[in-house]
Amino acid sequence: MNCYKGGRMIAKDYQRGVQSSFLESVFDSVPANIAVLDREGWIVSVNEPWRIFAVANGADASKTGVGVNYFDICREAQGSSSEQARECLEGLLRVRNGSASQVDIEYPCHAPDEQRWFLMRAVRLRGQDGILVSHFNVTERKLSEKHRIRAEERFRALIEHSLDGICLLNRHAEIQYLSPSGLRILGYPLGELAGHVFFDRVYPEDCEFLKPLFEKVLSVDGGIESAQFRWRNGKGNWRWIEGTAKNLLRQPSVGAVVCNFRDITDRKQWVMDLQESEDRFRDLFENASDMIQILSPEGRFQYVNRTFRNVLGYAPGELARLNVMDVVHPESREHCRQMFKALCQGHDFERVEASFLSKHGRKIEVEGRCNARFVEGKLISVRGIFRDVSRRNRAERELRRLNRELEERVKHRTRALEAARQRAESADRVKSVFLATMSHELRTPLNSIIGFTGILHQGMAGPLNPEQRKQLEMVLNSARHLLELVNDVLDISKIEAGQLEVLWESFDFPASLRKIEQAIRPQAKKKNLELSVSISPEVGRVVSDRTRIEQVLLNLANNAVKFTQTGSVRIKAAIQGNRLAVQVEDTGEGIRSSDLARLFKPFMQLSPGKQEGTGLGLSICKRIVEKLGGEIFVVSEWGKGSIFGFRLPLAPETHETQPPDKPGEGGIYEPERVGHRRQ
């Protein structure tokens, strides 16, 4: 009996040993790195992978195996792994304390030659106060996730930065997703279109063909269709969209109809504008009055406009069967062959003269220009624009004949006119010489009349009654006026006869100007006009003809007073460079711009009959100033007054001064203003 009991105990001990050995073998065969901890963190058991893992990572097996406190290992971790070690310790403590039944913590554990990640899983042992700690190598999964995330980021960046929009629709055409570019193209903020039916914002007429097209896409797995349609954006504007839809509903990773689209409004407008431009130019070419042709590289007609057909007498389509040489007149055919050959080699002809042959054999003379069109060095077409000049050429030939006849007549008439001109100039010179010579004989009687009438008017020959005084005053004024007229006529005659003498001398110009001021002041005072004279300090003595300058000054000042009814007359003198500049400003009615060119012509009055005079004063002034080497000018604005003036050299180089190249017609200048501008 005792033997039997002893045998059973031996058998049980053997069975327990076998079971323990079996469990240890199973424990060691688990690929995970496993350790069992007691409540205080002491390692009570580890499997073989745990020991191999510790050695592979450079750890001392005695410091990571049974009898070592795992909590202390986590607390004492240093360097880059210290943060993960603390996180692991916190998780282990939560499991020990019962606040968590299981804790999973991923952490990197990189070897020198590779990157590795591990998952630590801590589980509380059931029925025991211990913790099962296992470490799994999740490097492959981690790298896969990393590659997947990187691929997703690339794909997302591709979608977000794509110029085209991407839209996902379900089978009911409801919008499930819109890329940022799609939102921008469709013109709505993020989220506003989500869940809406795509066709709600499509142009109604476009929905009629777009909806059946969408149904067609749905009917075939992987079906794909493209279309152009109009879409109302967030601002209420209709935009043209070009899109392609593909059925990927059965693909688990997509599960939608994928639409790629872009805004083609600008392109559509450009195409419409281009079509309109083409139509416009086609109409322009077709209705042009010139003959337009386009030839193939072989010389066959590709296009001719209506004028080309009408001039040559062909119906539409007939010329398409012909070569260009078929419509060239025989006398121009060889020339046109050589020209066509040169055109095919890249030469342009800006002027072409040739003769065409109509359908009915009529010769048509044309002129025009030709060039060739090349694309990447290849000849595409030869183009020509011509004009029917048959009638013009006939007219030119007739005109040349008439011109030859006219030239003969003109030569004969020119000889006759030249003889008449010479006779007229001779008579004019005789007249001018006569008037210049007779100046003394014409002035002497008038001076006598003025002198003796003045004696009678002053009562020196006896007392006069009022009527006699009035009559004598009229005689005196008329005689003086007649003397002025005679003086003007004689002066202009002397100038034209070349007998105007210039007396050069140095004189005090300010004194002469004051003298003129005193002469015209009574007239200005009589009309209540403000008369002022402004002389710059640098103005002094000048070398010129004092009498002639005073004559010009008096004429300009008298005119200013005569034609000014209210306001002022201002005379200014200054030095400009090496010239004396004088100008007379008035506030009269001014001169129209259309009348300025006539001012300095002899016997010219802008208001005939309104003012006394011969119209010679300004003409004489101009001739005198030019004789003295200067120039005269006028600036006037109708309704605001006028400025007359002249510029003279302070000391001419020679006494025989010639008129300057300036002025232009009528002696009109744009002056450099003397003194202050009139307000």
Image: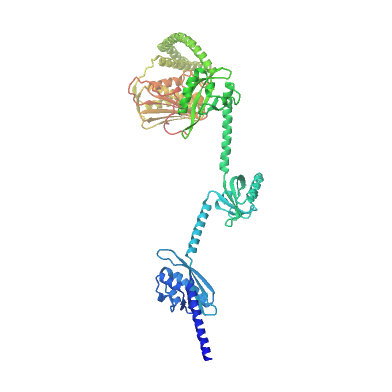
Residue placed at 52% from the left, 22% from the top?
325
Q: Which of 319 and 163 is in front in this view?
A: 319
Vertical side of 259 occupied by 345: above or below: above
Q: Nearer the viewer, residue 124 or 282?
A: 124
Residue 203 locus on image (x, y percent) = 64, 45
Residue 574 locus on image (x, y percent) = 39, 30
Q: Is residue 384 visible?
A: yes
Along the horizontal axis of the image, is 247 left or right of 611? right
**Farthest bottom residue in view:** 1
Residue placed at 51% from the left, 90% from the top?
3
Q: Which of 401 and 104 is in front in this view?
A: 104
Vertical side of 256 occupied by 3: above or below: below
Q: Which of 353 and 280 is in front in this view?
A: 353
The quadrant of the image that shows the N terminus is bottom right
Residue 195 locus on image (x, y percent) = 63, 55
Image quadrant assignment for residue 276: top right
Along the horizontal axis of the image, is 540 left or right of 24? left
Residue placed at 49% from the left, 61% from the top?
144
Vertical side of 246 occupied by 98: above or below: below
